[in-house]
Amino acid sequence: MISNYLFKIKSHIHFIEKIIEEDIKNGFPIKKIRFRFPPEPNGYLHIGHVKAICLNFELSKKYKSPINLRFDDTNPIGENKKFIDSIKKDILFLGFHWDNESYASDYFSKLYEWAIKLIQKNKAYVDDQSKNIIQFQRKNPFEIGIKSHYRNRSIDENLFLFEKMKNGFFEEESCVLRAKINMSSSNMNMRDPIMYRILRRKHHKTGYQWCIYPTYDWTHGLCDYIEQISHSLCSLEFENRRPLYDWYLSQIYNQNKKDKIKPKQIEFSRLNLSHTITSKRKIQYLIEKKVIQSWDDPRILTISGLRKKGYTSIALKNFIHKIGITKRNNIIDISFLEFCIREHLNKITPRVMVVLHPIKLIIDNYLLNHTEWVEAENNPEDSNFGNRKIPFSKYVYIEENDFLEKDEKNFFRLSIGKEVRLKNAYIIKANSVIKNYEGKIKEIHCTYDSHSKSGQKNKIREKGRVKSTLHWVSVKHSFPIEINLYNSLFLNRNPNIDDFHKHINPKSKNKIIGYAEPSLKKAKKGDHFQFQRIGYFYVDSKIINKKDQIIFNKTVSIKNKWNETKR
């Protein structure tokens, strides 16, 4: 009896769920639903992979079906165990767990056997032509391709040559195995695609056992078949390859075996973000040219880079859920991703005061050696965070850009003769400045209103409220912290072009020393904080062999640049 589970298609589910539920409605057994996530281990996962991961793993959870983490390791050039380890770490960071771990290389022997079957059916042949000639003969979708003169080799000769390829008798690029399909097809993928090429390279898993390696197209669908993946979900650029996916499966799939299913490929739009690149080749170029430090540099949107910048798994998954699963390609403005992390961090981070570019402020009428501990909320969004005490004294630092000697229109911060409030403390009035020999302001002298302490009710002040509140730290109680300020790596909104390197932002990273309130001395690696009025920051490391040396990475600014029209 067929279960009626999820027969009713709900309007809010995405199109892939509708396809799956329609399959169930038409009799596909729910217990045979299987998914997989198949990354190639030649680089770190990026923000685009988060979409594919969430889609596959959440569908697996919804249908209570197994999911495989299958590494597409068919190209020993560039593939590395360190990338495998990073991929696993990133998936676990996102909160997902796989049921089975597999590798395309696990099936090399089976794939070789099936290639022989295609040769025996006269549907594959060894071609001795060079890569350039093969490419030339394929022509374009509007021209009929030129058939290779090796296309009519006998089955016995092809079997003999293919075995010699496997046994290492030929050099790289001397010959390939091609499927014999249709050189007149308007779909270029069907014009006798390459199935095997010679690569005399060490494989991370099989070593030098093989010197011929299957291509992605030959491998992918057949691995899905071996693992009995019911719904093979790919990004939209694989849509034109689906006929080849199905053709390869049709050569192997045995319809007489009723217990075996034929996988179905479904495509969805890939995730494209503004002001960034996700191409592994381009990221590798940036690393080699020392534009970025590594694959986990916070200026690129690898999952590791985002994690190092302070992005949370919840924010990344919320972002994916909000943009949805569609078949329409578009570019999402990166400010929407920033909106999602800001939205989450606002709820979970304690507030602290840190001055990035300090200028000294002296309160002339405050007692010289007096320290007052003022009370501040740790997070006004959640009373469970409680309060903390902050030291206040005669000498404090404020931000340099919070002061102008001569007031200007629409400048609401501190200037001579003007009042502002020091957050959680008192209202002050700037009276004069002292400059150094270069004419730069060295210190600001001001007075404070002792009756204006935060939390105190004052009828006089109710009539004349100040327009601005500034953050600050006590000079003698603060301590230095190292801060990495990050900006967009690219000045161009869409840098995914050939000359992408010409659009690199020379000011994408700025390392400074800021001064923090003493409560931050307890910060641990992995902690998140809101630096009030500045942004959200993440503890990248804490060096315990040096006194209080803590390194913070900026996650995102306080200000939200995203609006609905940008989506």
Image (cartoon, rainbow, N blue to C red):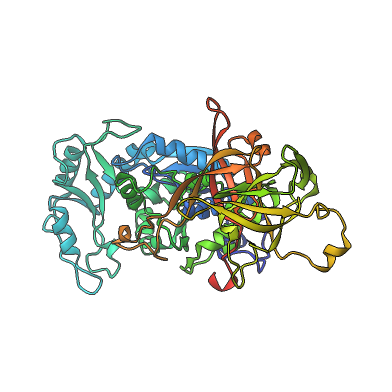
Could you say where residue 26 lies in the image, as x and y percent from the top left? 59, 62
200 displayed left or right of 466: left
Vertical comparison of 552 with 238: above or below: above
Q: Residue at x 56, y 49 (%)?
A: 356
Which of the two residues, 491 or 109, is positioned nearer the viewer here? 491
Q: Residue at x 30, y 44 (%)?
A: 288
Which of the two residues, 276 or 200, is positioned nearer the viewer here? 276
* Residue 318 showing in the rendered view: no
Could you say where residue 316 lies in the image, as x and y percent from the top left? 57, 53
Q: Residue at x 66, y 69 (%)?
A: 11
Q: Quadrant of the C terminus?
A: bottom right
Q: Find residue 192 and report its image quarter.
A: bottom left
Q: Quadrant of the N terminus?
A: bottom right
Vertical comparison of 27 with 205: above or below: below
161 displayed left or right of 26: left
Q: Residue at x 68, y 64 (%)?
A: 418
Which of the two residues, 325 or 488, is positioned nearer the viewer here? 488
Could you say where residue 406 lies in the image, as x and y percent from the top left? 58, 66
* Residue 150 showing in the rendered view: yes
Could you say where residue 459 lies in the image, as x and y percent from the top left? 88, 63
Furthest toward the left, the residue is 149
Which of the two residues, 516 or 367, is positioned nearer the viewer here? 367
